[in-house]
Image: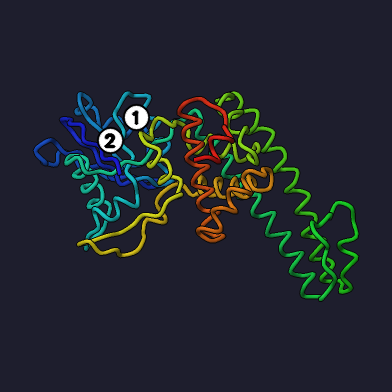
Amino acid sequence: MRFYNRQHRFYCGIDLHARTMFVVIMDQAGSILLERNVKTDPEVFLSLLVPYREDVVVAVECIFTWYWLADLCADEKIPFVLGHALYMKAIHGGKAKNDRIEARKIAALLRGGMIPQAYDYPAPMRSTRDLLRRRLYLVRQRAELLSHVLNTNSQCNLPDFGGRIHYKCGGVVERFADASVRKSIETDLKLLEHYDELITDLELYIVRTAKLHDADTFHRLRSIPGVGKILAMTILYEVHDIDRFPRVQEFCSYGRLVKCSRESAGKHQGFGGQKIGNVHLKWAFSEAAVSFLSKCAEGRALVERLRRKHGKGKALSILAHKLGRAVYYMMARGKTFDMQRFVSC
């Protein structure tokens, strides 16, 4: 957990919403200089800061509306702190809750150097990262359609498709005798065709954009067996700047590749923090571990050794962790994947 502990003359805490925001400005002594509920308008916000622009820092909790405020502060050269929502919830929980109280607590945490920081992703690559996440949502919607076709086939007790459903070749709708069922399956297939077009177009656009942003890192990530364009782009855009992780342990924790142990008075109390970290990186490394096995004989031999020692499920988790560590050093040192070194560690 990282805290913002730089000293300023004024501290601005904001409880931000989609249409309004409650602004509290506090001085170094803790005296409240301004409290106001205003519209989320850049000009209105900047006008509030005019008397304090000499040395003010702005903090807001990490919710879906922080993009415009971070970009505005960057353009105006105002220090901006993005508070980690889950960590802040644990720190400033209270009996009563409203916009005024939340904004005061954010300003007080900022003044005391106790506001936990989230990463305020810079604007140039942010929109492409969000588009890549949107593509993943569409892929999952497409998978739900395919699952519905398979489930309907099982409901009717029909023979298996024998692998992938080749719906573009025809013959899928004709398997079902009932007219309503046929209509339902026909609707699924039409949606699948539309999703295929959308996803293909998105992938082409994102690949071109990734090569413009950081082509070298993109191609280095693809040197890992089983890591294709989508996994490489996911890792590239979710990490963005590897230098923000001073140690490989912090990177693996951010990617949800390690368990967080809880101890008190020398007693182990289980594991926690499963929702803290980047779920997209967790997915990417889990998928990379499975693809790595299918593409690489050395990887299968490594997992077999791990399986005999730790069991099948834990062996795959260890492989995903090793891939995460390898990616960290590849990005930090500008190196391609070294299979011999990977399997020997």
Q: Would residue 227 appear left or right of 276 to someone viewing this image?
A: right
Nearer to the camera, 278 or 120 = 278
Q: Tag 2: residue type?
A: Val
**In the figure, 113 relative to 180: above or below?**
above
**In the figure, 159 relative to 231: above or below?**
below
Quadrant containing the N terminus is top left
Q: Quadrant of residue 66?
A: top left
Nearer to the camera, 67 or 259 = 259
**In the figure, 78 relative to 60: above or below?**
above
Instruction: For marks 1 and 2, give the CA distance.
Output: 8 Å
Which label number is shown at residue 73? 1
Q: Callout 2: few (<14), some (14-19), or many (20+) C-alpha neighbours within 10 Å?
A: many
Q: Callout 1: few (<14), some (14-19), or many (20+) C-alpha neighbours within 10 Å?
A: some
Q: Would residue 30 appear left or right of 102 to someone viewing this image?
A: left
The residue pinned by badge 2 equals: 58
Q: Tag 1: residue type?
A: Cys
| Helix, strand or loop status at disc 2 | strand
State the image coordinates of residue 159 (x, y, percent, origin top left). Answer: 85, 70
